[in-house]
Amino acid sequence: MTSILIRSAQIIDPDSVYHGKQTDIYIKDGIIESMGSDLGVSADTEINASGQIANTGWLDILSYCGEPGEEWKEDLKSLSAAAQAGGFTHVAVLAGNHPLPDHAAAISSIRKSGEDLPVHILPLGNITRDAKGQEMAELNDMVKAGAIGFSDGDNAISDTGLISRLMEYTSGFKTPILYFPYDKKLAPGGRMHEGVVSTSLGLKGMPSVSESAALERILQIAAWLKAPVRVVRVSSAETVDAIRKAKAAGTDVKAAVPALNLLFTDEHLETFNENHKVLPPYRTEKDRTALWQGLSDGTIDAVMSNHHAQDIENKAVEFEYAGWGASSVQTVLQAMTGGGRPDLNLIASALSSGPRKLMGLPKVSLNIGQPADITLYSPTAEWVFEPSLNYSKGVNQPLLGKTLKGLVMGTVKAGVWFVNRAAVKNI
């Protein structure tokens, strides 16, 4: 038997009877056994959480991992370590390049490889065979093998007939398809947001309409079929407006925004920093403001890491040829605190309850008798993100070397306390 006592944490969880209160949490064998002030108990592990916030464990809805096939970029062990340091207890992972996760055996293998790691690895399967957007993969078989969702990664589906068939086929599924709204044909050769900055830099742009037009197509099909739709990686003001209108019209749509798009704009590419070459691209300050407004008013339901680690061969090259993506799962909180200083309730909903609702996963709460799944963090602590504290194999970390606000102290996963080494070093 193992026990953990978290002392004097502020609970932020609207589903908890202790929401907004400072309380102790006593955990025994993975279950919250008691909560209250000054619990007269001792435990194997005791944590002084005075001044810290306790949320139900955070869930990331989409991280990429090279294992199997490109383990030198990222493997499940390094991804798990980075995610835990970022405050996540669950990570939905699109794992593998050789082979791709488009069949049941790949999903089973990912689940097995993810056992006994600091976070729960939740496998995502490809929507289509070889992620080519042409032929539906064996979705039902992957669900039976443990897939909790589907994504084709950077390969957005443009075939409207296929989108409609997917919505019809999965109408009875509890396992969502994560649609990435992007029409590549409207942004041929694009390397960043199309606008004043791209013109001044001489780079081909990716106009907002390449996202909004693709989204409108998806939303119209969903409204026609009266089907639920889950949209990820939204980045433009036009997209936020379209989602807001669709929700008002009664469409069951939920959406997620990448954390870095809440912090950065296209102006951050003026130095040709390859670590800022991400998909979807950073857009303008107007777009960034609209994303924050959408998150605040409930139009956007969740914040996601959009983590995509790259090795030096794919990033330390000319901007034109650099690979897409940023290593970002470890700094989602800091992107939020640096990008808009959100309130504590917004952090909890964007990283915990919102992602679970989007993915159709069971609700969790900080109440007596519930499984202990907890993220503990300080919203005000500042720390330096030194290279020694970067757990990901990815070299493409935009915030590395920066002084950041917001520090994850540790997480409780399956009754085990995992401390964040950055907290030990900085507190």
Image (cartoon, helix red, strand yellow):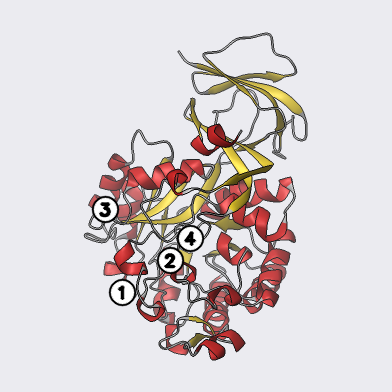
Q: Please tell me whether mark 4 or mark 3 is closer to you in this view.
A: 3
Crowding at label 4, few (<14), some or many (≥20) Cα neighbours within 10 Å?
many
Is mark 4 in CB contact (under 8 Å) with mark 3?
A: no
**Residue at mark 2:** 325
The residue indicated by pointer 4 is 306
Of 193 and 197, nearer the camera is: 197
Quick check: 207 left or right of 151?
right
Identify the residue under disc 3: 71
- Looking at the rendered structure, the kind of residue marked 3 is Glu
For the residue labelled by badge 3, is the local secondary structure a helix, a strand or a loop?
loop
Give me the residue at 44% from left, 81% from top.
160
| Distance CA(mark 1)–CA(mark 3) | 22 Å
Q: Amino acid at mark 1?
A: Lys
| Secondary structure of the residue carrying numbered label 1 | loop
Task: Tell me which label, 2 or 3, sits earlier in the chain.
Answer: 3
The amino acid pointed to by label 4 is Asn
For the residue labelled by badge 4, is the local secondary structure a helix, a strand or a loop?
loop
Q: CA distance from mark 4 to mark 3?
A: 18 Å
What secondary structure is found at the residue carrying circle 2? loop
x and y, in percent, of residue 141 in the image:
30, 54
Return the disc, 2 or 1, that comes first in the chain's sequence.
Answer: 1
Q: Which mark is residue 132?
A: 1
